[in-house]
Every structure is written in structure tokens, then in C-alpha cells.
Image (cartoon, rainbow, N blue to C red):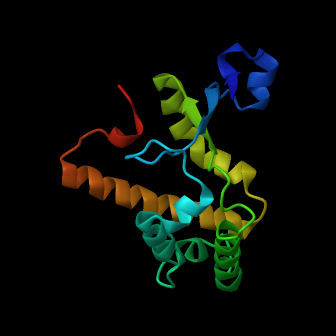
Amino acid sequence: VKFKNGMAISDKEAEEAMHLRLMLVYVKFTPKDPVTGAQWTFGDLCRNPEVQKAWAEYAHPDNASPVEEGVVGCGPWHRQINRALEWLHSPEIKHRTVTVVCEVQIILQSYREMRIGMHEMYKALRADNAIRLHTDFVKNQKQAQAAKALNHDCGASDPHPFGTFK
């Protein structure tokens, strides 16, 4: 669909982007039925037991991570989920083909390491208020603890083994 080559930008553009140079590829993905090969419609998606299970888990009151992370309040969170489900189940889109535009980021290992090192500073720069800044840091701590536990459980020594293709 679209390709952005961050390696080809000017030095001035790179400076404005904190010298982060990466390539972005946007691709269309249309899920297909594994048996028939037919493209899925929104109706197919809504009838799929795995999709129903994923939505039920996502909407379950015990799944409050976006609320805990300060992204949204509990009331708006559940209203947004209900609104999305109403839209997905609406007769107007039931027969429309599902297509998702996905972003793939391609980055050199050396740039990736630099990006990881400066990510905390970038969070401080982009935070629009103290609450968002705190939320970002709390979320980051939880993710780091989970990654460390996963690496330990898998016997991995690389601090980011599941985030890199080699």
C-alpha cells in the first residue's frame, strides 16, 4: 500500500525525527477461510468462535489493563467496546470483506539499540501532562518485568530476544 524509506530522508528531516531512521511498509491483509480460501466478511468474523472468545476476554471486567494504565476510564472503556461490537455486528457491513492495513517497521540493529536507549527520553518529550508521563513509565516497568520473567523462564540471555529478527 505504502512505503516510507527513513534511510533516504535529509539530515534536517532526521534531526526533526530525533535521528530515528527506519523504513515503514504498510500492507493490506485480508484474512481468508483456511478451508475454502474465501475472503472473510465481517459476518464471518463475528461468527468465528476464536474471534468471539477474544472479544469476550477483551471486554471482560477483569481485563482492566487500559484502565489501570490510565489510557481511559472504566466507563468509557466499556462503552467503547460495546460501540465497537455494535458496529462490527451491524447489518450494513455484514457482507463487506475484512481488510486491515498493517504497519511493518524495518530498522537496522544499531538504530534499534539506540532507539531502546533513548525511548525513556522520548516518552518524556511526547507526554502531554504529568499523568500520561507517569502512566507511560508504570506501563514500561510492567512490560520490562514481564519480559525479564519470560527471558528467565526461556533461559534467554539476550534482553530483547523476541523483538529482533536475526
Q: 126 above or below 163?
A: below
- Closer-to-camera residue (60/136): 60
Q: Quadrant of the C terminus?
A: top left
Q: Is residue 65 left or right of residue 3?
A: left
Q: 164 above or below 53?
A: above
Q: Is residue 83 left or right of residue 69?
A: right
- Residue at x 29% of width, y 38% of height: 158
Q: Is residue 4 left or right of residue 51?
A: right
Q: 161 above or below 73?
A: above
Residue 2 in picture, x, y percent from top left: 70, 27
- Residue at x 70% of width, y 70% of height: 90
Extreme residue in the front direction: 36
Residue 14 in picture, x, y percent from top left: 74, 23
Residue 89 in picture, x, y percent from top left: 65, 70
- Closer-to-camera residue (27/62): 27
- Residue at x 36% of width, y 54% of height: 147
Extreme residue in the left direction: 155
- Closer-to-camera residue (87/76): 87
